[in-house]
Image (tube, rainbow, N blue to C red):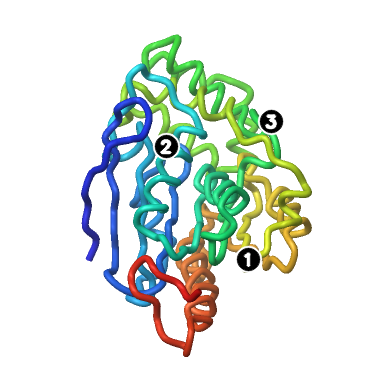
Amino acid sequence: MATEHFIPSATGGARLSVTLRGSSGLPVLFQHGLGGDAQQVARIFPQSDRFNLTTIECAGHGGSTDPEPRAFSLESFYRDLDIYTAEHFPRGFVAGGISMGAALALTLAIRKPASIRALILVRPAWFLSKSPANLEPIRLVGELLQRYTRKEALGMFLESDLCSQIKESSPDNHGTLIDYLGDHQPKWLGKLLTDITGDGFELSATQLEDINVPTFIIGVEADEIHPLALAEQFHRLIPGSRFAKVPRKDDVLARPNYYDRTAELISEFLSEIAEQSVGGAEDAPGECPT
């Protein structure tokens, strides 16, 4: 059963929602994507007591509040994760994430190598520099939301060449962009989308080659925002990493579907990590073998 509590952000005064599931087993911090939340993670994470899952909803996401002044950065998101994990997982944890969450998990693995037991990157969208071109569709939606009413922004997007093109090439991306323009979204979403898609961590190929923990990378086809080629590039650069391609999110005929297959693969990978514990025993919460 999942539980939720709140912590203060290290920057900007936001109140962050932290969702926990499991009270024992392998500690895993798994982060959502841009505009996502803990539920996004729950849909692809295995339902198993062997894994102690933590998801921190970044400022402006899910049940978390937005910062004041209203400015968003991956570095501020990273700092919140770094502080939390240092306090709660002093002997190490598995870092993982979807899209934006994958960028944060990767940066934890590079900056805090002694703390990371394993790394999981699902549909990565950022590579080695800021403002990647594959995020341009999200940037456009963010700009429309800041300049026009939601109704006007939606109409302009639906009439755009980009909308027609991405609907054909990546139906799932199209659905995500339409969802960003929905009335249910928070008023600060436009600023969040433009701030984060224009941001990134300045990393190097050498830093990827120096990653020395079990790493699993998952990609999908027909996803322009999360290119399969990018996931494959991570696989080539991170030594000994594993790679798997899962069904498209919009493939309703796939059995198992994107969510179930991703959960299966993550479960298999984490089970192997858990079995590497001293004596084959499960770790206590927040602990890993020395």
Q: Marks 1 and 3, how far apart in space?
A: 29 Å
Q: Give the label on residue 213, or none.
A: 1
Q: Earlier in the sequence, mark 1 or mark 2?
A: 2
- Please tell me which of labels 1 and 3 falls first in the chain: 3
Amino acid tagged 3: Ala
Mark 1 vs mark 3: in front: 1
Residue at x 54% of width, y 71% of height: 265
Residue 3, quarter of picture: bottom left
**Is residue 32 left or right of 174 when viewed as pictured?**
left
Q: Judging from the image, what secondary structure is the residue with disc 1 in?
A: loop
- Badge 1 local density, few (<14 within 10 Å), some, or many (20+)? some
Residue at the image position 56 percent from the left and 24 percent from the top? 139
Q: Amino acid at mark 1?
A: Val
The image shows residue 52, relative to residue 64, as above or below, that is below
In this view of the protein, which residue sits in the foreground, 260 or 128? Answer: 128
Q: Which mark is residue 133?
A: 3
Q: Which residue is mark 2?
A: 35
Q: Secondary structure at mark 3?
A: helix
On the image, the x and y values in percent for residue 154 come to 44, 21
Front one among 156 and 99: 99
Q: Which is nearer the N-term, disc 2 or disc 3?
A: 2
Looking at the rendered structure, the kind of residue marked 2 is: Gly
* Quarter of the image where the N terminus is located: bottom left
